[in-house]
Amino acid sequence: MSDAKPALPHWDLSNVYSGLEADDFAADLKQAGLQLDELDAFARKAGIERLAELPTDVPATAKTLEEMIGRLNRGIELLETLGAYVYSFVTTDSYNKVASRRQSEIEQLEVRLRQQMTRFQAFVGSLGPILDDLAQQSDVIAEHRLALDDEVEQSRYLMETPLEDLASELLLTGGGSMWKLQGVVTSQLKMPFEREGKIEDLPMTVIRSLASDPDPDIRRRAHEVELEGWASIREPVAFALNCVKGSSITLARRRGFEGVLHAALERNRIDRQTLDALLGSIRDHFPMFRRYFASKAEKLGKKRLDWWDLAAPVGTSNPTYSWAEARAYVEGQFAQFSDELAAFARRAFENDWIDAEPRDGKRGGAFCMSVPKVKESRVLANFDGSFDQLVTIAHELGHGYHNYCQRDLPPIRSGSPMCLAETASIFCETLVFNAALQTASPAEQLSILENQLLGASQVTVDISSRFIFESEVIDRRAEVELSADDFCEIMLRAQKETYGDALDAEHLHPYMWLLKPHYYYGNLNFYNFPYAFGLLFGLGVFAVYEREGKAFIPRYQELLRSTGAGKAADLAERFGIDIRSRDFWNGSLSVIAGQVDRYCALQE
């Protein structure tokens, strides 16, 4: 077997554990189980559950709460590290049976931890009226105060403890486990495709990447082969979608939410007024995006775009980058913001935190995950040398920098609701985009703006279609199971409503519901509008930076550090941003409108 390194890096987690069957991994896995045994025993002895009445012994209660916080923080850190390590294998090699087995072991432990976190939430909810008194007794409680306030509020939506325990256990075997089915069957699907007279069996990640090929015939044929491939697995994936949405509907009702959307809003720490302002502003700007699509069609020599043209390159100057060039560019632009951000990126590149090579068994797309034990992150990408992938690397490193800003926080105080999780990634993406645009020739500007507007349209127009799709699916699934044909019909109708006449209605994408993993996470329903929120909120924060310059950096770092506690509106208010008003979202969209104007004025 050759020891040669791949042309593109695979991530290195050797500083975390030596291997899935190594002694150090086994020792921590055993330690996680022992920690949970001790946590279970402590919780039973201390009465960590919803209380019938307020305790009168405040010092003793403070001691109990402080001890529980410490045990949970230690348990979360260890299990998240173990989970991230295993996930690094699962997402890059779906054929790895050892990783699948290890993942199952960890999931059993995660169920137990979730059950104790639910008890903790119920316990803290009971202590709401005396949290001030408890905080005066303990520095640990005072430091966790915002997070505890959030637990008090969320405790309103808990079922009785035995039912919450059952719900946690069923995440492994019921609707909550359907993301595994979707992930395995989509990542292992291959289809024959002919290029240059040669037929190859290509993974679907590779076939989907052909959507950006400059040859319109290749794009069209790739789209047709892609749809054929998805059609071949649609029945098991439709079954999975019915299961996960059915489970979500039941749990939302049992927990006292007004519906699945209400549960998603609470999870994102935003209210319906904010969501309506966001989506309403985006809808008002559909004509602006359709003007971009029309200009793109004209530049491609077409009357109207087909679906396979959405990601088509425009112009004669479409820059490509080697891995070394991409690294140098990202580090250079990050340095324009701060030495700290550039140093963070340099460390990620030098230590192989990024898995960049597309390959069989590896999942498509990109993500960043935290590895708490070593206070690092790891990034999955599928690098093809395009400007889009250059921006993707910057985007995911932004997530990593967000983790870096929270590196010394205990787990209960760290993290972020999804809508705020995109703040740093959009910020870093914008750094790279703006810099590229400033130094580009007119021909290069066209390509760069094309990349930016394609991404923006996906995160607004296409995300709107996904929101419409999921809303109707949940409404209808409450009454009856839906067929694969139903899902396709709903998706096509949502695409027609959002894209309008910008796309040929005969050539849309009926299987977007099948290939997007976001629909299949049992506890992450409506994993769509947070992306739109993230893009436009990130643009708004970047506008603050442009006004204030380097003086903004400490406040920006504090914002990233603080996203794990408090409501989104309260955090935004620190920057003078009212996210419940369409005016803010309109302002962010006006930035994109300016880019559309510039794009439309450019000629090839």
Image: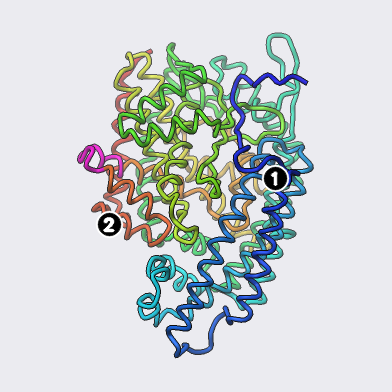
| Circle 2 residues within 10 Å: few <14, some 14–19, many ≥20 | few
Please tell me whether mark 2 or mark 1 is closer to you in this view.
2
Residue sitting at 61 percent across and 78 percent down? Answer: 160
| Circle 1 residues within 10 Å: few <14, some 14–19, many ≥20 | many
Numbered label attached to residue 488:
none
Mark 1 sits on what residue?
A: 182
Name the kind of residue labelled 1 in the image.
Gln
State the residue in front, 51 or 338. 338
Mark 2 sits on what residue?
A: 573
Residue sitting at 38 percent across and 16 percent down? Answer: 444
- Whether residue 596 is visible here, answered yes or no, is no
- Percent x, y for residue 304? 48, 25
Q: Earlier in the sequence, mark 2 or mark 1?
A: 1
- Percent x, y for residue 311? 51, 26
State the residue in front, 512 or 80. 80
Residue sitting at 71 percent across and 16 percent down? Answer: 194
Q: Which residues are magenta?
A: 541-552
Residue 200 vs 132, above or below: the answer is: above
The quadrant of the image that shows the C terminus is top left
